[in-house]
Image (tube, helix red, strand yellow):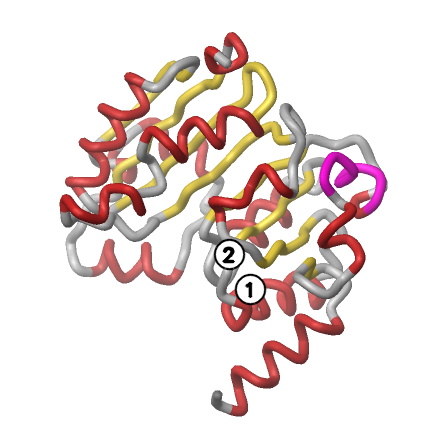
């Protein structure tokens, strides 16, 4: 392990805004995010596979009246977002180190108002469909967490994942696609993204890739 990684893991162990194995909140925060961490009743928004937490921090700055949680298993990545949030005194931002497949261990049904999935690994090989974060299994998992009428967002530069996700979301119980575009930056939907972007999204744009976007609502208790 490099010194930089060791420093980031040490940061996570001490940072109040990183919840990971070994800390008390890791096993007690489920159903208690509003009281035990944020200490307010504001809406809760997740960024799944958040990486360095660029969206989590960016939205947290833009909307102080909402609470944001970046989720990723990579501790060296979320340490960077954690530092940025602390430096900006963003008390409405937290990071949870865990795999997305364990989402139900940290949130009760309806505890989350909104979910963002920003440039996830498209996992294009057929044998890796089970890893795609917009497959039927994961969409069902999100539906159990999002409240009635909550919103699910997907941003991707990958045409395959975009088309795949349009199909799986349209078929998922309780999901209704509200809007989608295969070129976000040339769409009226761009105004809804509040100039929040990621390092990789900027690189994709510089290389000429279009950014694709899907917004869906979860309703009727997602058919559960």
For the point 42% across and 51% down, the residue is 197
Query: The residue tagged with tag 2: helix, strand or loop?
Result: strand
Q: How far across and down, in percent of the image, does residue 212 sit? A: 26, 38
In the drawing, does residue 136 fall left or right of residue 174?
A: left
Q: In this view, does 132 lie above or below 51?
A: above
Residues at badges 1 and 2 in contact (C-beta under 8 Å)? yes
Magenta-highlighted residues: 30-36
For the point 80% across and 47% down, the residue is 37
The residue lying toward the viewer, choosing from 57 and 39, is 39
Query: In the drawing, what numbered circle is on residue 139?
Result: none
Q: How crowded is mark 2: few (under 14 residues within 10 Å), some or many (20 or more)?
A: many
Q: How crowded is mark 1: few (under 14 residues within 10 Å), some or many (20 or more)?
A: many
Q: Indicate whether residue 35 is drawn in magenta.
A: yes
For the point 78% across and 47% down, the residue is 28
Q: Indicate whether residue 187 is drawn in magenta.
A: no
The residue lying toward the viewer, choosing from 135 and 119, is 135
In the drawing, does residue 164 fall left or right of residue 66?
A: left
Quarter of the view holding residue 172: top left
Q: Which comes before the other along the chain, label 1 or label 2?
A: 2
Q: How far across and down, in percent of the image, does residue 208 sit? A: 15, 54
Residue that label 1 marks: 78
Quarter of the view holding residue 159: top left
Query: The residue tagged with tag 1: helix, strand or loop?
Result: helix
Q: How far across and down, in percent of the image, does residue 168 sit? A: 27, 25
Q: Which residue lies furthest to the top in this view?
A: 220
Q: How far across and down, in percent of the image, does residue 202 sit? A: 32, 58
Q: Which of marks 1 and 2 is in front?
A: 2
Question: How many dots with numbers?
Answer: 2
Instruction: Calculate the distance from the C-alpha at mark 1 to the C-alpha at mark 2.
Output: 7 Å
Residue that label 2 marks: 72
């Amino acid at each position: 392990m490099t010194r930089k990684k060791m420093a980031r893991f040490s940061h996570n162990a001490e940072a109040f805004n990183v919840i990971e194995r070994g800390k008390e909140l890791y096993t007690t925060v489920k159903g208690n995010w509003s009281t035990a961490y944020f200490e307010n009743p504001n809406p809760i928004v997740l960024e799944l596979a958040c990486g360095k937490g660029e969206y989590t921090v960016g939205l947290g700055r833009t909307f102080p009246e909402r609470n944001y949680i970046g989720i990723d298993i990579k501790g060296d990545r979320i340490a960077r977002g954690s530092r940025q949030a602390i430096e900006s005194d963003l008390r409405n931002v937290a990071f949870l180190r865990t795999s997305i497949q364990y989402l139900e261990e940290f949130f009760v049904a309806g505890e989350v108002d909104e979910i963002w999935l920003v440039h996830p690994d498209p996992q294009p090989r057929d044998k890796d469909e089970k890893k795609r974060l917009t497959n039927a299994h994961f969409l069902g998992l999100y539906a159990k967490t999002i409240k009635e009428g909550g919103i699910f967002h997907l941003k991707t530069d990958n045409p395959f994942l975009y088309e795949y996700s349009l199909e799986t979301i349209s078929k998922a119980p309780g999901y209704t696609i509200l809007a989608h575009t295969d070129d976000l930056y040339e769409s009226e939907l761009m105004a809804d993204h509040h100039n929040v972007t990621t390092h990789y999204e900027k690189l994709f744009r510089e290389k000429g890739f279009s950014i694709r976007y899907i917004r869906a609502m979860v309703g009727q208790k997602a058919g559960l």
